[in-house]
Image: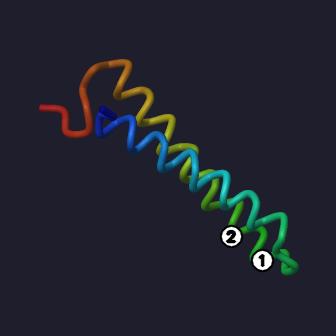
Amino acid sequence: MMTEEDQLDLYHRERAIAERRAAKRAQDTRAQAAHLGLAQQHELAQAIAWHRADLGTGRNPS
């Protein structure tokens, strides 16, 4: 069974990939930049999820 952190990791990884693909398909440079920005945000969120998992704090540390 997947933990919440694993689910978030998978979600953000898939979204980052999808946004990079959308950026490649986009004709407008502003749209490309927007998709790449979203991809970077998802990659950052994935890195934060990894960090929290390594620390064992979970999503809502107390």
Instruction: Tell me: 60 left or right of 7.
Output: left
In the picture, the quarter occupied by the C terminus is top left
Q: Position of residue 56 (x, y in %)?
A: 27, 20
Marks 1 and 2 close (CB-CB < 8 Å): yes
Give me the residue at 56% from left, 45% from top.
13
Give me the residue at 58% from left, 50% from top.
14
In the picture, the quarter occupied by the N terminus is top left
Instruction: Tell me: 10 left or right of 52.
Output: right
Give me the residue at 40% from left, 44% from top.
8
Q: Quadrant of residue 51?
A: top left
Closest to the observer, 57 or 11:
11
> The residue under label 2 is which amino acid type?
Ala
Residue 28 lies, with reference to residue 32, above or below; the image says below
Residue denoted by label 1:
30
| SS assignment at label 2 | helix
> The residue under label 1 is which amino acid type?
Arg
Closest to the observer, 5 or 45:
5
Q: Residue furthest left?
A: 62
What is the number of callouts on the image? 2
* Mark 2 residue crowding within 10 angstroms, few (<14) / some (14–19) / many (20+): some
Closest to the observer, 61 or 20:
20
Residue denoted by label 2:
34
Q: Position of residue 17 (x, y in %)?
A: 67, 52
Residue 19 lies, with reference to residue 14, above or below; the image says below
Give me the residue at 54% from left, 51% from top.
42
